[in-house]
Image (cartoon, coloured by chain):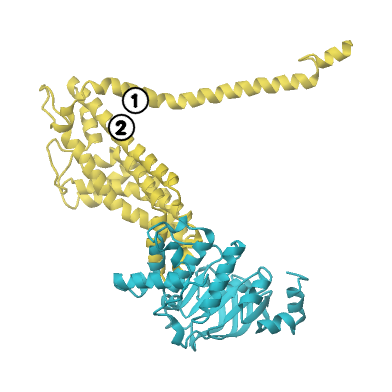
Chain colours: A yellow, B cyan
Amino acid sequence: MTSAASDHGAFSSPRARGLLRRRVVSVIMIVLTCVAAALAVVPLVVILAYLFKQGASALSFGFFTHMPKPVGEVGGGMANAILGTLILIGLAAAFGLPIGIGAGLYLAEHRGTRLANLVRFLADVLNGLPSIVMGIFAWQFLVKPFGHFSALAGGAALGAMMIPLVSRTTEEMVRTVPQALREAALALGYPRWRTSLQIVLRTALGGIVTGVLVAVARVAGETAPLLFTAFGNSFWSTNLRQPIAALPLQIFTYAISPYDDWHAQAWAGALVLIGLVLVISVTARFVTRARHGGGHG
Amino acid sequence: MSAPVTSPDAGALRQGGTIDVEQFSFWYGKTQALFDIDLAIAPREVTALIGPSGCGKSTFLRSINRLNELIPGARRTGVIRLDGEDIYQKGMDVVTLRQRVGMVFQRWNPFPKSIYDNVAYGPRINARPRPADLDVIVESSLRRAALWDEVKDRLGASALALSGGQQQRLCIARALANDPEVLLLDEPASALDPIATQKVEELVYELKRELTIVIVTHNLQQAARISDRTAFFYLGKLIEVGGTQRLFTSPSEERTEAYITGRFG
């Protein structure tokens, strides 16, 4: 009876001790991963909370509609910077999307060829390129020859950053289009280019739109490529060949200034910028969900 | 099930649709899939291609509209003639060829568009008819595919809302809208239920009055029911070809007999 009792005793036999150790290790690991997961979210939560606390006070309706005021004057907004950022995003999309989508389509439809592998590799390199380098590049070829900063140069720098992001998503999405659909169009006498554009691209469109919005959100907050391309502008300007204001630049300028009311403005600008990116991201999610929920794609 | 076949552009008077194959061989990379095929396919007949899986039937079928050449590493020798014209010659436009030689696949593959748009797809870029004429083509194609009565009230509905059998007949209508001389069918009924299969078979029987039909099938009864001539493929070679009744009742090759009596395959 005693031996039986010791066998069934919880932690006395070697087997039971092994079990206990496994359980302890398991609990420790679970706790550690939970802590890591929590820590991963902490920066975002802290940033958002602090931004809201600092920025909300300076944020008003006038912030969206008024121009910046000189130091010491009350009020004023960032209407020019908000408009500038929207214009820059539009330019970036105009430069980056056709090239990015076209390249992605080529990569997917001609996969396996040596050129496709090379292009994919170079796109990955481009994706890893520091954004300040992209700015220097744009300055060298689009600012220096013309003698002045311009919205066009800023848009081109941002557009170049979008290319690898968009081409990679496009390639992934185009690959999911069933071969049977391609063959159906080809067998009807469709030329290959037309099959790619009308059948393949259109079928993959939902996914591509999502990728595009993610890329837009990504470049909307870029500062470095704009420092010596778009440069910034304290006045209302829609001239694409002149320097233009942008939210990230305005935030940068205000944040490094010594004036308290400019600091508050910088916080408010950051809040608006995050809101802009958030709206784009949520739209992207919504589009994706609509695609998956809307039946066949 | 015999919907009225009213087709203003049906090829009742057309003489085309003869296929002549001479010494045709085909490779996927280093693997040879077809060996020296010699075959004459007569117009307005149904020719069935039978044989075990992997014997080259589908490869052969896809060689007739040059769909195979998209596969990297594909290579071929020999000649396939459509109405006396070498389809692999330099001057042959592959787009025109595929309009003359329509194809329907094993797994129906309508575009994720409306029923009308699916049928109008080919004519829209090939013949480029006026909208009123396009309506006529769509209706006649759907009638020829025996689908008109089932879909005439919902031409704008998504093609993907149709049943499998209807989708397959829509794919046939889509091919017919180009007014082809030859229709290639790659196991068109193998994924359909018996009723839908019967409809497709009746359709093939109707359509052979107007065009040349080449059908790949794993179903020997189906080959016997609907084809005029049967070609037996085995390991990439054409073993035997002849009138369907003759081939099924008194095959001259031992391997043909072994296959049709179910000893292998």
Above or below, comparing residue B3 to residue A230 in the picture: below
Q: Quickly name the residue at label 1.
A: A48
Subunit that carries the residue with mark 2: A
Q: Position of residue A29 (x, y in %)?
A: 60, 24
* Tag 1–tag 2 contact (CB < 8 Å): yes
Which residue is depicted at the point 62% across and 73% down?
A: B57
Q: Is residue A151 above or below residue B196?
A: above
The residue that appears at 58% across and 24% down in the rendered structure is: A30
Q: Regarding mark 1 in the picture, which secondary structure is present there?
A: helix
Q: Is residue B39 above or below residue A178?
A: below
Using the image, name the chain to which the residue with label 1 belongs.
A
Neighbour tally class for label 2: few under 14, some 14-19, many 20 plus, Cα within 10 Å: some
Q: In the drawing, does residue B21 fall left or right of residue A144?
A: right
Q: Secondary structure at mark 2?
A: helix
Dot label at residue B58: none
Can residue B108 be seen in this snapshot?
no
Q: Position of residue B137 (x, y in %)?
A: 37, 73
Image quarter (top left, top right, bottom left or bottom right) of the N terminus of chain A: top right
Q: As drawn, is A96 to the left or to the right of B223?
A: left
| Cα separation between marks 1 and 2 | 9 Å
Horizontal and vertical percent for residue B71? 53, 68
Q: Amino acid at mark 1?
A: Leu
Please name the residue that numbered disc 2 is placed on: A274
Res A53 seen here: yes
Q: Amino acid at mark 2?
A: Ile
